[in-house]
Amino acid sequence: MSVRDRLAAGQDTGWWGRTGVWVAPLALIAVVVLSFGVGKYPIAAGDVIAAVIGRLTGQPSTVDPTIETVLWQVRLPRVLAGLAVGAALAAAGATYQGLFRNPLVSPDILGVSAGASLGAVLGIFLSLPVLMIQLLAFIGGLAAVALVYAVGAAIRTRDPILVLVLAGVAVGALLGACLSLLKVLADPYNQLPAITYWLLGSLAAVTRGDLVSILPALAIGFVPLVLLRWRMNLMTLGDEEARALGIDTTRLRALLIAGATLITAASVSITGVIGWIGLLIPHIARMLVGPDFGRLLLASVMLGAGYLVGIDALARSIAAMETPLGILTAALGAPFFLYLLATTRKGWE
Amino acid sequence: MTLAAVNVAFGYRGAPVGRGVSCAVDAGEVLCLLGPNGGGKTTLLKTLLGLIPAQGGAITIDGRALADFARPELARRLGYVPQAHNALFPFTVREVVLMGRAARVGLFSAPSAQDRDAARQALHALGIDHLADRTYTTISGGERQMTLIARALAQEPAILVMDEPTANLDFGNQTRVIEQIAKLAAQGLGILLSTHDPDHAFACADQVALLRGGDLIALGSPQETLTSDMLRRLYGVDVAVTYLTDVGRYVCTPSFNRSPRGETT
């Protein structure tokens, strides 16, 4: 079908669909290069590229050693963490939006963020070491979703998806209450600011070790999303129709939820809660490449990674002090989201 | 292949809908389910598809109990055409039809060239090749219904189960769907459909099952079952059934008459 035929038929010409395939990776590379240069110690993009080429070719670098140190010791772990966490949150969001058949769902729907927050805040409240706080956050996130899933499976109705969502709301509220209690009880001078910062998310404190520690969880979590990418499309039809087409929906849903939860919990455990990425990015990705989950997953991963790295560069450059990521993702994401709502309904009806 | 129900009770735990239903669909045969709203048609169809567990009795495919089939095995034998609905995400018609291949695609695989071929053939069989690249969410109700039938054909089932395939369609599209059903049956497919229009049963059915309040009140050929007496019992309104020689089959129409202008009755 020619473009003219498609236009005549009143449908999208797929311009974005085809262009997006090139735009996304190029934009991602550009954002990464720029973000290496941004921060308290600015580095020109040319130096960044020269340093990278020096590393890759093994030639002695002409770049200032201080620049080298900042690049490889400070910026690299931070950028890599931004890429990994942004990709994970966006991929989890894309999965949940399809599973729950709702384009306005975020990865928090089953309580993973609420559980992780409670775990981390408990760790801060008990003045535990950083590693324990991260572990508690990770376990808290997984435990919250496991609880929601168990409740959903125990209540047998005709609409398992709705029950899961409602169980998620209830458990989330319960965890939120516990969280509020800990905030009230926390020491207002030491612990409360730490809690507040954690709940708004940051990449500032992420180390190379943190990144390495979550990589296995990320890798395992992505496996079901990638392998089941075509079947994921059928999950958007709803439980009954998918089953009539030969899908074991209960098993598939469990696998996909487990994967999406694992990557979200792992991400949140080292960065704190970073909102909006999981909601907004899959939405934009769907507008660019359409609803097919294989393409949607790839586009979400690239856009999510680029978005978080870009936001993080902004966070360390717009003010003297680091701006928490949650503030920026919401402040930029929400208006953009409203703009999308007002101007287009493509991507969902 | 035969889909058979013997003395089946259906509904939900704690909320039974119907009982004592026995019927069978053979290859190449059309069984038409008629009955008033709330009579249990959709619940019965979903039970026969294995989407809802039967509360009693036996449902079998060629003598083997439905419950013994794994989901994909069942989907290769029974195709399901739900009522035309609006999908949430804007898949193309081609992608929607391709989803019919799920039971024939490996768990971790994407559809092969062979699957794409099957989807293309299903579109072609229904004469909707031209819709392939359109977005499912933007086509008309009739086109959506045809797409869902194509998706069920892509399953390559022996029996099609269709829940009110003519609901919400205009007169022309209803006729097209019924014609298509007759054509598919002639090609050897067994078809079980529910409808609100007894004329559809006259037009395409070999057997008619009348379901009221969860009970099967009649089962037989259209001429035997769709009498004006029976239709009055079923729907509670007076219906005239007559033979149209021009068309060569029975038709029915409600037999009330509008009173002449100016008079009151």
Image (cartoon, coloured by chain):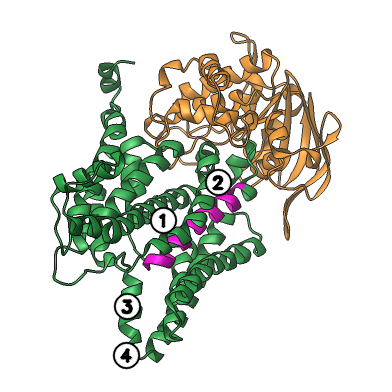
Chain colours: A green, B orange
Q: Mark 1 points at which residue?
A: A105
Helix, strand or loop for disc 1 = loop
Helix, strand or loop for disc 3 = helix
Q: Which of B220 and A49 is in front in this view?
A: A49
**Badge 1 amino acid:** Val
* Chain to which the residue tagged by mark 3 belongs: A
**Badge 2 amino acid:** Pro
* Chain to which the residue tagged by mark 2 belongs: A
Residue B239 in percent (x, y) is at 63, 31
- Residue A188 — which label? 4
* Chain to which the residue tagged by mark 1 belongs: A
Q: How crowded is mark 4: few (under 14 residues within 10 Å), some or many (20 or more)?
A: few
Residue sitting at the far top: B246
Which numbered disc flags the more N-terminal residue, 1 or 4?
1
As displayed, is residue A193 above or below residue B72? below
Which numbered disc flags the more N-terminal residue, 3 or 2?
3
User: Is residue B3 rendered to the left or right of residue A129?
Assistant: right
Residue A68 in percent (x, y) is at 23, 55
Q: Distance between the residues labelled 2 and 1?
A: 20 Å
Q: Is the magenta stretch mostly helix, strand or loop?
A: helix
Q: Which residue is drawn at 65% across and 14% down?
A: B249
- Residue A224 — which label? 2
Which residue range is magenta in the image? A252-272
Q: Nearer the viewer, residue A133 or B235?
A: A133
Q: Distance between the residues labelled 3 and 2?
A: 34 Å
Q: Distance between the residues labelled 3 and 4?
A: 11 Å
Q: Nearer the viewer, residue A287 or B249?
A: A287
Helix, strand or loop for disc 4 = loop
Q: Residue at x 19, y 43 (%)?
A: A50
Residue sitting at the far front: A60
User: Is residue B5 visible in this depiction of the protein?
Assistant: yes
User: Is residue A214 rendered to the left or right of residue B221?
Assistant: left
